[in-house]
Amino acid sequence: MADNKKRLVVLTGAGISAESGFQTFRDSGGLWEKYNVEDVASIQGWYRNPKLMTDFYNDMRAQLEKAQPNDGHKILAELEKYFDVQIITQNVDNLHEKAGSSHVLHLHGELTKARPVNNENKIIDIGYRKMEYGEKNSDGETLRPHIVWFGEAVPEIMNAAKLVRSADIFAVIGSSLVVYPAAGLIQDLRSGTRAYLIDPKEVDVPGWLNFHVIREVASKGVKILRDELLKDFA
């Protein structure tokens, strides 16, 4: 029963998807590098050139269709046997779901979904297909990618904070912790919560949070995390 399991809350960022061949925001040579971020990842960019942004997210969706979850994603899914695993992801891909994770909260939207320009609640699943520029839903409303862009509110942030506060164990995997409000979620940790950070790069975390740092790429780091958690809690 899930009620008897320790709750493991995991915040994932671009680093967990990079090993799956899904080019991320900060990857050298990645899809993003060809564009000014303000042109393809801000609400102002959408107002300026919605066709460019429609094409950009079509390209990302086509790339995502070919991407497969790596060991980092798969092990998190497997840990559901032992823990109540709740994933909060900053990523817009569906690699956690492909790996079999049951509880995934997407802070920044999802590539495989769309919604009307003026209604964030009428979300539809479009899979990996191309969106047409100016495409409308059955109610005649113009659609846009279901992505939370810079300059927009993050509707799920309060639900994410509630999850973090409920954690018995917390892990940050592949997130630089520089994009807010997601980066601020670590401030919601209860005192004494066991916390881990997995990233091959230096990540600035307040010292008082006392994270156990695993300086590895996600696929290797999550294996280490799994072994530690099973030794201490399972």
Image: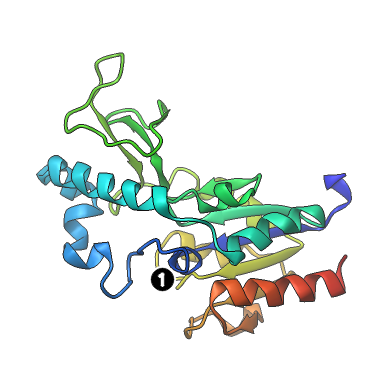
Q: Quadrant of residue 120?
A: top left
Q: Who is closer to the viewer here, 200 or 209?
A: 200
Q: Is residue 42 visible?
A: yes
Residue at point 26%, 34% (across, down): 131
Packing grade of label 1 (10 A; few <14, some 14-19, many >=20) is few
115 relative to 159, above or below: above
- Residue 184 lies, with reference to residue 146, above or below; the image says below
Q: Which residue does the image show at 35% across and 45% down from the upper left? A: 147
**How are the colours assigned in the image?**
rainbow
Quarter of the rendering occupied by the C terminus: bottom right
The image quadrant that residue 218 belongs to is bottom right
**In the depicted view, which residue is nearer to us: 116 or 114?**
114
Residue sitting at x 22%, y 26%: 135
Which quadrant would the N terminus be assigned to in this image? top right
Q: Would residue 56 be found to the left or right of residue 92 on screen?
A: left
What residue did someone put label 1 on? Answer: 178
Q: Position of residue 33 (x, y in %)?
A: 22, 68
Q: Is residue 24 above or below residue 101?
A: below
The residue positioned 17% from the left and 62% from the top of the image is 35
**Is 139 placed left or right of 188 in the picture?**
left
Quarter-of-image position of residue 50 = top left
Residue 107, given in percent of the width and then of the height, sits at 47, 50
Residue 197 x %, y % = 60, 76
> In the image as oriented, which residue stretches furthest toward the left?
48
Residue 166 in the image, given as x and y percentages of width and height:
72, 55
Q: Which residue type does callout 1 highlight?
A: Val
Q: Is 32 displayed left or right of 127 in the figure?
A: left
Say whether residue 192 is visible. no
Q: In the image, is residue 225 above or below residue 10?
A: below
In this picture, residue 20 sits left or right of residue 8: left
Which type of secondary structure does the marked residue at label 1 adopt? loop
